[in-house]
Image (tube, grey):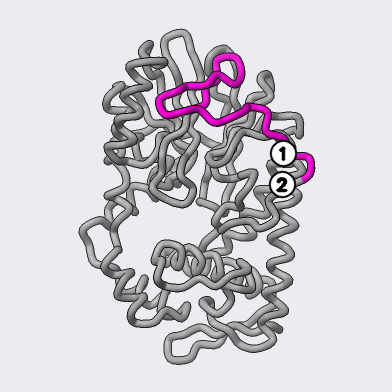
Amino acid sequence: MTDANHRDTGLAYPCGTPPERGEAREIAPGVRWMRLALPSTLTHINVWALEEADGHTLIDTGLGNEDTAETWRMLLEGPFAKGVTRVIVTHLHPDHVGMAGWLTRRANRRLWMTRTEYLQCRMLAGDTGHPAPDEAIAFYRRAGWDDAALDTYQKRFGTFGRLIFALPASYRRIRDRDIIAIGGHDWEVVVGAGHTPEHACLYCPALKLFVSGDQVLPRISSNVSVLPSEPDADPLAEWLASLDAIRERVPDDVLVLPAHNEPFTGLHARLARLAASQRRAIERLHGALSEPKRAVDIFSTLFGRAVGPGDASTYGLATGESIAHLNYLVNRGLAAVDEKHGVAWYRAV
């Protein structure tokens, strides 16, 4: 969800105006910045290319549709005509992994991902064409969704697989602290969690660059949600711990290459602001639970605005993020939950 306090002091945007469609802007030696369109309020995703002797390593791929494919054709026949050496995907969301299967098959190259992201992506894609499971319907009913919202969810269920090209049946696993040699420089894998289970960032000390994916964004905050497949998860705790870990492992003097908005400097200031914003939200929520509330009752408390079921995608994201905050309080003994007729009511303790 949007971070209302996004004007961080200490942040700067030194790379100028974003590249146009089909442009590969060099922002550091051998490092190119591209933008791919998204049919959403975000409007775009940033993707990156790292030059090597025999081609380019690509990082993230865009949404799986014909418009994105056409942009990649422009790039592959233009600045990347030398070829693709590998495709690295930071995490499983469709705007990042959507074209990975298309690109790896076209270039006959490997897909590099963390194990959890690859396997969960395959799992979600496998839901396409199947009805929504009873457990998922019960999950959203427990959050306070009414019959109309649940009906919309059931009609939309399984859309994930339609947003991505099928992943290759094998991949190259990357792990936290792996060192990947690309273009004469070492890039360290820095894994975060919370936004997704095993999100890979990449840090190059020699170039002072940090590819942050969705783990650290300059103008918006990452969605941190509980999903029906793991209703008792505590992703907010994982995300806050990841912010601390990034601050310890990545110095402040890097240029951050995020998936959305523009490259920026001021990493540590942004990490501090994100953590402080979440902790304020936790405190507001704890205060609001002086009276029992459902997950759908706390949107205004967390996000500063109402969120209705008319926008099904936003409603689902807001619900998942609300449950993440509620689980955080419950797991720390700051809230309790009572079940009434299949609906969860939370109260401060």
The kind of secondary structure the magenta stretch mainly shows is: loop
The answer to whether 273 is drawn above or below residue 299 in the figure is above
- Residue pictured at 42% horizontal, 79% vertical: 145
Q: Which residues are magenta?
A: 9-33
Q: Mark 1 and mark 2 in contact? Answer it, CB < 8 Å.
A: yes
- Residue pictured at 64% horizontal, 59% vertical: 237
- Residue 185 in picture, x, y percent from top left: 60, 16
Q: Which quadrant would residue 323 be assigned to in this image?
A: bottom right
Check disc 1: other Cα within 10 Å, few if <14, some if 14-19, many if 20+. Answer: many
Q: Secondary structure at mark 2?
A: helix
In the image, 300 versus 271, the foreground residue is 300
Q: Amino acid at mark 1?
A: Leu
- Residue 126 visible in this rendered orientation of the protein: yes
For label 2, the residue is: 271
Q: Amino acid at mark 2?
A: Leu
Q: Which quadrant would residue 202 be assigned to in this image?
A: top right
The answer to whether 147 is drawn above or below residue 70 in the figure is below
Please say whether residue 322 is one of the residues in the magenta stretch.
Answer: no
For label 1, the residue is: 267
- Residue 189 visible in this rendered orientation of the protein: no
In the rendered picture of this protein, how many numbered marks are placed on residues?
2
Q: CA distance from mark 1 to mark 2?
A: 6 Å
- Residue 321 in picture, x, y percent from top left: 54, 65
Q: Secondary structure at mark 1?
A: helix
- Residue 84 in picture, x, y percent from top left: 38, 19
Most distant residue in the top direction: 53
- Residue pictured at 55% horizontal, 87% vertical: 338
The answer to whether 112 is drawn above or below residue 1 in the figure is above
Asked whether, in this view, residue 155 is left or right of residue 96, the answer is left
In the image, 268 versus 135, the foreground residue is 268
